[in-house]
Amino acid sequence: MSRWPSTKGRQVLRALLKIGWTIRARKSSSHLQLSHAEHGEYTWAFSDSEEIGPKMLARIAKHTGLTPQDL
């Protein structure tokens, strides 16, 4: 697996939307319910300006199919 860079929340969310995730519902200002045909549902709980570290990005990728090249 490639090394994950620290990335802002808005950039990761943009990448998820680009690979086919859609926003199904907005639960609050920073909680979104995302949906994908192959991967099911995922709750996005990061603000746009929040820095997401490599370990958390790897966990997100495990559930969403995100790759370092998608960022």
Image: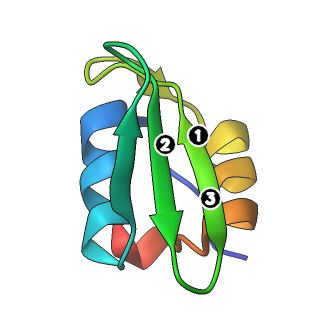
Name the foreground residue: 41 vs 19. Answer: 41
Spatial CA distance of label 3 from label 2 is 7 Å
- Residue picked out by circle 1: 43
Q: Where is residue 24 in the image (x, y as percent from the top left)?
A: 38, 51
Task: Give yes or no for contact between labels 1 and 3 (Cβ–Cβ under 8 Å).
Answer: yes
Q: Residues within 10 Å of mark 2 (few under 14, many from 20)?
A: some
* Mark 3 residue type: Glu
- Residue picked out by circle 3: 41
Name of the residue lying farthest toward the bottom: 38
Q: What element carries label 2?
A: strand
Spatial CA distance of label 1 from label 2 is 5 Å
- Residue picked out by circle 2: 33
Q: What element carries label 1?
A: strand
Residue 6 seen in the figure: no
65 sits to left or right of 9: right
* Mark 1 residue type: Thr
Task: Give yes or no for contact between labels 3 and 2 (Cβ–Cβ under 8 Å).
Answer: yes
Q: Position of residue 19 (x, y in %)?
A: 35, 78
Examine the image and state in which quarter residue 69 appears: bottom left
